[in-house]
Image (cartoon, helix red, strand yellow):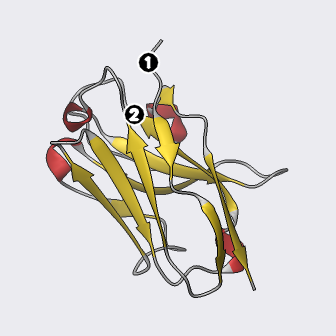
Amino acid sequence: QLQLVESGGGLVQAGGSLRLSCAAPGLTLDYSAIGWFRQVPGKEREGVSCMSSGGSRPDYADSVKGRFTISRDNAKNTVYLQMNSLKPEDTAVYYCAADPVLFRKCVLAENNYDIWGQGTQVTVSS
């Protein structure tokens, strides 16, 4: 079963930065839309950012626009989420996910994704 692997989470002070990575053994990420989602206990999973195949058309939730940047490194088959100016409300488990329909435009809706990682914890202290 295909699975993505997230890394890069951790504890950071408010105003700090982290870069999350999403690797995909066995899957060519460049052909798929990739999404980043986050979830806080007791709340629904929230779409944070996504990028369509070929690195085009990134989209961001309003809450992270101007602070987070999604990018791809096709040579490493890895997608990144650079998170700057972090706030305590960014604290969550972050997941990356791949759209199984190749070359489809990305959307911040988890129903479009069915290949997920196990998540990485991001904690922002005030």
Q: Which mark is residue 87?
A: none
Please determine whether, in this image, residue 64 is positioned above or below residue 14: above
User: Where in the figure is residue 73, as x and y percent of width and height?
Assistant: 21, 50
**Quadrant hosting residue 15:** bottom right
Which element is circle 2 on? strand
**Quadrant hosting residue 58:** bottom left
User: Where in the figure is residue 65, as x and y percent of width and height?
Assistant: 43, 76
The answer to which of 7 and 67 lies nearer the viewer is 7
Q: Residue at x 47, y 50 (%)?
A: 36
Of all residues, the one furthest to the top in this rendering is: 1
User: Where in the figure is residue 121, as x and y percent of width and height?
Assistant: 66, 54
Residue type at the position of mark 1: Leu
Residue count near mark 2 (Cα–Cα under 10 Å), binned few <14, some 14–19, many ≥20 = many
**Quadrant hosting residue 9:** bottom right
Question: Which residue is the site of mark 1?
Answer: 2
The answer to which of 37 and 74 lies nearer the viewer is 74
User: Where in the figure is residue 35, as x and y percent of width and height?
Assistant: 42, 46
Q: Which mark is residue 98?
A: 2
Q: Residue at x 55, y 83 (%)?
A: 16
Residue type at the position of mark 2: Ala
Quadrant in the picture for the C terminus:
bottom right
Please determine whether, in this image, residue 70 is positioned above or below residue 53: below
Residue count near mark 1 (Cα–Cα under 10 Å), binned few <14, some 14–19, many ≥20 = few
**Mark 2–mark 1 contact, CB under 8 Å?**
yes
